Image (cartoon, grey):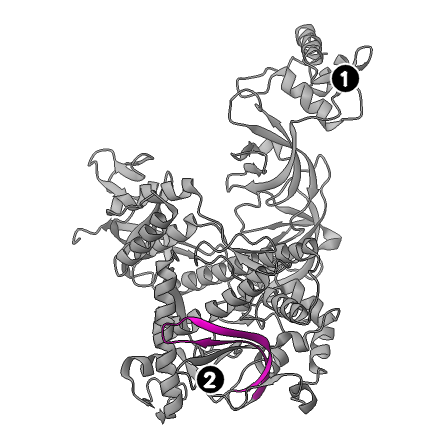
């Protein structure tokens, strides 16, 4: 009995597109109409005649060729094939990201063909020449972005499945019984995909690590790191190698360096810092100018190329700063001891030393290896106290030690003068078009069990800006010094913002009465600064700050210097944090190599290293963000009976996102659970509108909410919508 002919609805592809798909997947194999009909499961005469007709039309259009009588091949070179990256959505569909397209190509679920988020793929693109929105199908997965996934295991009698909390991972992972290992029902595990048979719905894998039980603190923190392929400890051989390094200060090495141990030197860092990357030295010169040294830990002296220690540091590329811990780039013996510029200790440093006048102009500069002695360690709060009061006695409540103490007069004088010069540098930078991103950072007070017991906000003050300006000066001048020699170097670059993103930002901020001036590059920068300044202290500040940052391009590392838009610098690099950033180590090595007269290095090799560093930085940023979300959810678990004032930070067709004013925790109020009316999404107003009351819920509105659900595993908060805040 023959099969019924398959009916094609409006959403299905035409025969021509389906024929091309078959021929494209088998580019070297000729097909006749019978073979194509069999693949399409069509055996009625009408459909076969359609296939014959379409084959002749495609051949006449020279899209395919008749390689032998009645058999056809797709042309050897097809402009409909592209290579790029998959960007999954949370709805099991995806977009294909490719430089050849101005807009992303939509990939329906049934056209993914086992491609996963961020995979490098080859895609066949439809509608390329019809003026329609392009749509595509994955022909081949060229390279997996990752093969290891974090999830919860569900063990059945003869097999198991691992389900991830990642909304972009649209499939679970099938685990055969003999590959479950020591995992127990409900454990959080790391599963590795080993195979994905063509006709299987799920990939096949094995359990390679058990992280623990869901909801346990260390389990969830380790799961965050594992999700992004980041380590949480060092291999034993790397630790042993680091322990054997001679970290003593040698007279023979001091002779190779500029000796600055007698120059007044101090550090200013967060009060809980353990690794001190940078120190400032200060000396008043006879001509009335100032010699200011920016001294950076000489990590490259200990981190020798070609060693297992250097390989590990390169692979990590960055330290990861989670809420309750730091996962360092270097083992503790280096990061917290040998390289750290600790008070009352001699240290090897790499320095940028400037002669600066009263107008904060650089009159002379010197770069090279030094040895220093740190006279004082300040926390930002202590330096800020001196700046604000001009007092030389740090009170007990401000002191790191909890005890009042007196600061030597030369250090007080140096701090005040450095603050004065830093303010001039900052003013000049802003006048040149730099954008001031002083976004409020959410911090947690943790108890001994790393449980969040309070929330506070970190705000940059003069002491923070003092350090920032001199670090920026060193980074800029080092980059300029090499850049003007036209030699290969590692730059930190930041492209101009995308105009479409700025227009979207304008649409949203206009609801709060703000605007962007698009007349020129300078006008855009000025209006963005005005915007960020105008929202300070307002209920919409965090929302506007976040949206403005998202409208910017992402900064990255590259050998191709295009300047840094956000800082308004033509030359910029990262020189000042080699304990926690590998690109800074590369900059130190290259700078010394060029100071020694070396020729320009291979740009292609260093561009590859830059791409790796940028990629790892992105993963670390995601992990840091997830750890904050985790702590926010954990904190809110203990506040389920409390009503909170929040600001609507997002509006979608499925509900509103609300950010709580007092702690910046964000959660979702689902549209079906807002009970005072029946709401629908109005995409023009970017709002939910009540059908009967015509009540509007839009960005920036204040609302009262309560916690409905706090999911630690998914790191999600769900809120009960209580009411719109009528006191506004």
- Badge 1 marks a residue whose secondary structure is helix
Question: Left or right: where does residue 392 sit relative to residue 350?
Answer: left
Residue assigned mark 2: 266
Question: Left or right: where does residue 154 sit relative to residue 77?
Answer: left
Residue 451 in view here: no
Front of the two marks 2 and 1: 2
Q: Give whichever of 173, 572 is nearer the camera.
A: 572
Residue 163 in view here: yes
As drawn, the label of residue 35 is 1
- Residue density around tag 2, few if under 14, some if 14–19, many if 20 or more, within 10 Å: many
For the point 29% across and 37% down, the residue is 685
Specify start and end residues of the magenta stretch as a single range.
346-373
For the point 68% across and 86% down, the residue is 253
Q: Quadrant of the N terminus?
A: top right
Instruction: Based on the picture, tell me whether residue 60 belongs to the magenta stretch.
Output: no
Q: Position of residue 173 (x, y in %)?
A: 65, 47
For the point 27% across and 49% down, the residue is 700
Quadrant hosting residue 428: bottom left
Q: Position of residue 257 (x, y in %)?
A: 63, 83
Q: Give whichever of 86, 646 is nearer the camera.
A: 86
- Residue density around tag 1, few if under 14, some if 14–19, many if 20 or more, within 10 Å: few
The mark that comes first in sequence, 2 or 1, is 1
- Cα separation, mark 2 vs mark 1, equals 79 Å
The vertical placement of 4 against 644, above or below, is above
Instruction: Based on the picture, tell me whether residue 363 belongs to the magenta stretch.
Output: yes
């Amino acid at each position: 009995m023959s099969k019924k002919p398959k009916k094609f609805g409006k959403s299905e592809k035409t025969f021509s597109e389906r024929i091309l798909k078959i021929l494209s997947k088998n580019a070297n194999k000729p097909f006749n109409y019978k073979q194509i009909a069999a693949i399409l499961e069509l055996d009625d005469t009408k459909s076969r005649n359609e296939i014959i007709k379409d084959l002749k039309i495609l051949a006449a259009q020279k899209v395919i060729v008749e390689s032998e009588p009645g058999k056809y091949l797709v042309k050897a070179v097809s402009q409909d094939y592209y290579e790029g990256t998959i960007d999954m959505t949370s709805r099991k569909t995806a977009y294909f990201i490719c430089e050849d397209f101005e807009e992303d190509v939509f990939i329906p679920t049934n056209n993914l063909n086992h491609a996963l988020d961020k995979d490098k793929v080859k895609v066949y693109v439809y509608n390329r020449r019809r003026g329609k929105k392009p749509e595509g199908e994955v022909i081949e997965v060229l390279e997996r972005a990752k093969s290891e996934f974090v999830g919860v295991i569900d063990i059945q009698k003869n097999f198991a499945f691992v389900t991830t909390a990642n909304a972009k991972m649209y499939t679970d992972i099938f685990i055969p019984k003999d590959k479950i290992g020591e995992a127990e029902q409900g454990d959080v595990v790391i599963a590795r995909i080993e195979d994905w048979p063509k006709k299987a719905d799920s990939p096949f894998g094995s359990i390679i690590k058990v992280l623990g039980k869901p909801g346990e603190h260390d389990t969830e923190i380790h799961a965050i790191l594992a999700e992004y392929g980041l380590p949480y400890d060092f291999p034993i051989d790397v630790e042993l190698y680091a322990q054997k390094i001679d970290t003593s200060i040698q007279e023979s090495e001091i002779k190779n360096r500029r000796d600055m141990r007698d120059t007044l030197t101090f550090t200013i860092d967060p009060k809980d810092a353990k690794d001190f990357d940078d120190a400032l030295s200060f000396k008043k010169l006879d001509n009335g100018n100032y010699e200011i040294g920016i001294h950076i830990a000489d990590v490259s002296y200990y981190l020798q190329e070609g060693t297992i220690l250097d390989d590990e540091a390169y692979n990590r590329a960055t330290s990861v700063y989670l809420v309750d811990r730091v996962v360092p780039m270097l083992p503790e013996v280096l990061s917290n001891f040998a390289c750290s510029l600790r008070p009352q200790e001699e240290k090897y440093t790499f320095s940028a030393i400037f002669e600066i006048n009263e107008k904060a102009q650089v009159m002379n500069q010197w770069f090279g290896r030094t040895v220093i002695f740190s006279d004082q360690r300040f926390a930002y709060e202590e330096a800020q106290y001196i700046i604000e009061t001009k007092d030389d006695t740090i009170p007990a409540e401000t002191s790191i030690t909890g005890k009042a103490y007196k600061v030597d007069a030369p250090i007080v004088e140096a701090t005040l003068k450095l603050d004065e010069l830093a303010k001039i540098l900052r003013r000049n930078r802003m006048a040149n078009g730099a954008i001031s991103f002083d976004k409020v950072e959410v911090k947690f007070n943790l108890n001994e069990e790393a449980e969040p017991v309070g929330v506070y906000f970190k705000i940059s003050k003069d002491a923070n800006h003092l350090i920032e300006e001199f670090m920026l000066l060193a980074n800029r001048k080092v980059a300029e010094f090499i850049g003007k020699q036209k030699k290969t170097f590692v730059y930190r670059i930041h492209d101009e913002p995308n105009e479409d993103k700025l227009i979207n930002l304008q649409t949203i901020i206009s609801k709060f009465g703000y605007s962007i001036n698009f007349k020129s590059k300078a006008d855009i920068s000025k209006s963005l600064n005005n915007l960020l300044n105008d929202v300070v202290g307002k209920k919409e500040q965090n929302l506007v700050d976040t949206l403005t940052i998202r409208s910017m391009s992402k900064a990255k590392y590259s050998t191709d210097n295009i300047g840094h838009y956000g800082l308004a610098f033509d030359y910029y690099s990262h020189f000042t944090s080699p304990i926690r950033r590998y690109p800074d180590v590369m900059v130190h090595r290259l700078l010394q190599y060029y100071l020694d007269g070396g020729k320009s290095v291979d740009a292609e090799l260093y561009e590859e290293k830059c791409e790796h560093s940028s990629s790892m930085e992105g993963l670390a940023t995601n992990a840091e963000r997830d750890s904050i979300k985790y702590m926010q959810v954990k904190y809110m678990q203990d506040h389920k009976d409390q009503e909170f004032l929040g600001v609507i930070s997002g509006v979608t067709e499925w509900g509103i996102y609300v950010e709580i004013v007092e702690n910046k925790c964000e959660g979702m109020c689902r549209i079906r659970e807002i009970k005072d009316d029946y709401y629908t999404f109005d995409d023009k107003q970017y709002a939910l509108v009540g059908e009967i009351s015509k009540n509007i819920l839009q960005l920036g509105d204040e609302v009262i909410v309560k916690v409905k659900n706090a999911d630690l595993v998914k790191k999600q908060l769900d809120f009960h919508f209580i009411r719109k805040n009528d006191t506004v």
